[in-house]
Amino acid sequence: MVANYKEEVAMGDAEFVSGPALILRSLASAPDRRAVIGADGTVITSGDFAAATYRLAHELIARGAARGTTVTLLTGNTPEALAARYAAGLAGARVVNLYDGMSAPVLAEITASVDTTILLVDAERYASAAELLPLIDVPTVLTLGPGPDAGSGTAVGEDVVAASVRRPAEPPDVRIGPEDDLNIRHTGGTTGIPKGILSLHGPYRHVFDAPIGSDPADGPPRLLVATPLAHLAGILADLTLRRGGTVVLQRSFDPGAVLAAVERERITDLWVLPPLLHQLLDHPAIGRTDLSGLRQVLYGGSASSPTRIREARKVFGPVLVGIYGMSETQLISVLTPREHDRTGQGGQVSVGRPVPGVEVAIRSLDGTDLPTGEQGEIHLRSGTVMAGYWKRPDLTAAVLRDGWLNTGDVGYFDEDGYLYLSDRAKDLIIVVGGHVYPSEVEDLLLTHPAVARCAVFGVRDDQEAEHVHVAVVPAPGQRPGLDELRAFVTARKGRIFAPEVLHLVDEIPLTPVGKPDKKRLREAATT
C-alpha cells in the first residue's frame, strides 16, 4: 500500500484515490454483501449503503460542501453517521466529530473554531443539538433522517437523507489530492482543552496497509463497534469495509451487550480500551459466552495491567493484539498474539515493535538519544504524522521539529526492539523524593486481591505540592483500607509510590473515548 501511494503521488494528484473513495469502490463492487448492521438490527447491504452515500455526497455538494469547507458531525454510532463521514470526504470537505460527553459550550467552541459550513445531526444526538444550537451560528444545519417529533419542541433542520434521494447514486466528480484536508480530530480532553489535529488525505491512505484487523483470507471480518465511531472504532470500520467485511454497531459500550453480540453475530474483531476489557473480564456472562469466532481482540489507548492482560489471554485465547497509536500520527506499534509472553521492567506489557514506515527514538529532555533500556520521551517520524494543530502554530511547533513528533509519552526499548510505555509525561506526579508514573502503581495495585479496578492521579495542595491519590473499585465482598494499600505498595515498590489518599468508588469514570477520566477524579477530590 505504501508503494502504491508513492506511485500515485509521483504520477500526479489526478491519479490519487482518497480513502473514502477506496472504501466506496469496495462496497459497490459487491453490492449484495451485508455491510452494516445497525444497533436496532437493521441490515444494510453494500450496494444500498454505497448508493445512499453517493447520493448524500451530491446533496452535501449542492448545499456548499467542498474543498476548504468543514462538515461537522453531531452523531452517534449509526449507519447514517458512517455514511455522512464518507459522503463529506467524497465532497472534498474536511470532517469534524463533536464527541458525546463534552459540554455544550465546549462543543460550541469547537464548532466555531473549525469554521463549520454544514452541521449534520443524527437521531442519537437530538438532545445534544437542543443545547448546542442556541450557542452557535452555522450556515446550514441538517438531520440525517427524520428530525424530532413536532411536539418535542426541538427544531433541528431539514432531513438531508430524504432530500438526497433525487441525487445520482454514483461518485461525485470531485478531484481530491493527497495534500487536501481529510479531518480535524480533537484530543480526548484528558489533559486539558481539546486540540484540533489536522490530517490530510494522503497520509490517511497508509491506514489501509496497517497490520491490524483479522486477515480477510480467513473469511470476511466482522467488526463489533461498541465505542465511538468518532475515534479508533471509525478507522477500524474503514478497514473492515474496505476488506469486504461487516460492521456491527452498538450505541454504546455495555459489557453484557458486547458479549451477547460477540456470540450472536460471530464477531471476529473487537476493539476495547483496557478499562473496557476489564469490564468484560469482570462480567458474570464471560464464562458462558461463546468466544470462538474471535480472531483479534485489539486493545490500547491507555495503560494495560500485566495481571489483567494475562487473565484476558486465558479467557479469550491467543487473539489479543496490543496497539499503540495516537491521533497525531495514527498507528505506531503492534504487539501480536504470539509476542504477549514478552515482558519488561517489573513485568510490564510491551506495546510491540514499531510498524513499517515508523521510526521511533527515545530521548532525554534536551533531545539526546538514550541507550536501550533507559526511559525517556518518545519521538517519532513517519509519513502519517499530522499536518499540525488546527490554527495553533505555537502548539504545532512545540511538538513537531525537524520532521520528528514528540508524542508526550515516556517509554523505553528493550534489547530486542520492543517498545514499552511508562506513562504520559503530563500524568507524571512529582513528589518529595522523586516522581511517580501512575501506570506503574496501577499495575501493582491490580494484583491486590481487594482491588478490581483503579486509577492513580496526582492532586496539588495549596502549596503546589503534589500528592498521590487512588480511586479504587473494590473486588466483590472486599473493602480495602488506605493503610492496607499503602503497606502493600511500600513493601513492593517504595514509600514515595504509596497512595496518600484513597477514594472508594463504584466505577472509574471514563472519558468519551473510554480512558480513565483523571480530570474528573482530580476535580472530585478537590471539592
Image (cartoon, rainbow, N blue to C red):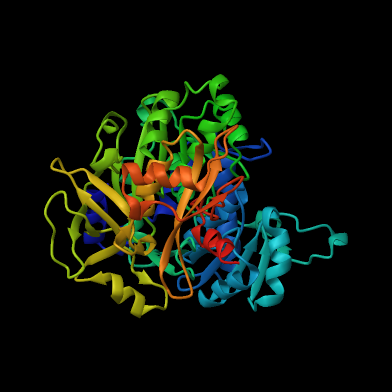
Is residue 237 visible to the viewer in this orientation of the structure?
no
Q: What percent of the width, then of the height, locates residue 33?
A: 53, 32
Vertical placement of 213 versus 173: above or below? above
Please tell me whether residue 127 is drawn above or below residue 484 in the rendered image.
below
Q: Horizontal and vertical percent for residue 19?
A: 40, 53
Q: Residue furthest right?
A: 151
> What residue appears at the point 17 percent right and 68 percent down from the top-left corner?
367
- In the figure, is residue 116 to the left or right of 24? right
Where, by quadrant of the figure, is residue 443 drawn? Answer: top left
Residue drawn at point x = 57 percent, y = 56 percent = 84
Q: Is residue 101 above or below residue 395?
A: above
Where residue 132 appears, x then y in whole percent? 68, 70
Residue 264 in sight:
yes
Between 335 and 172, which is closer to the camera in this rendering? 335
- How many numbered discs sit on the rendered protein? 0
Identified at 27% across, 41% down, the residue is 346
In front here: 255 or 148?
255
Residue appearing at x 21%, y 47% in the figure: 356
Q: Could you say which is closer to the camera, residue 119 or residue 526?
A: 526
Image side of residue 404 versus residue 270, left or right? left
Q: Quadrant of residue 524?
A: bottom right
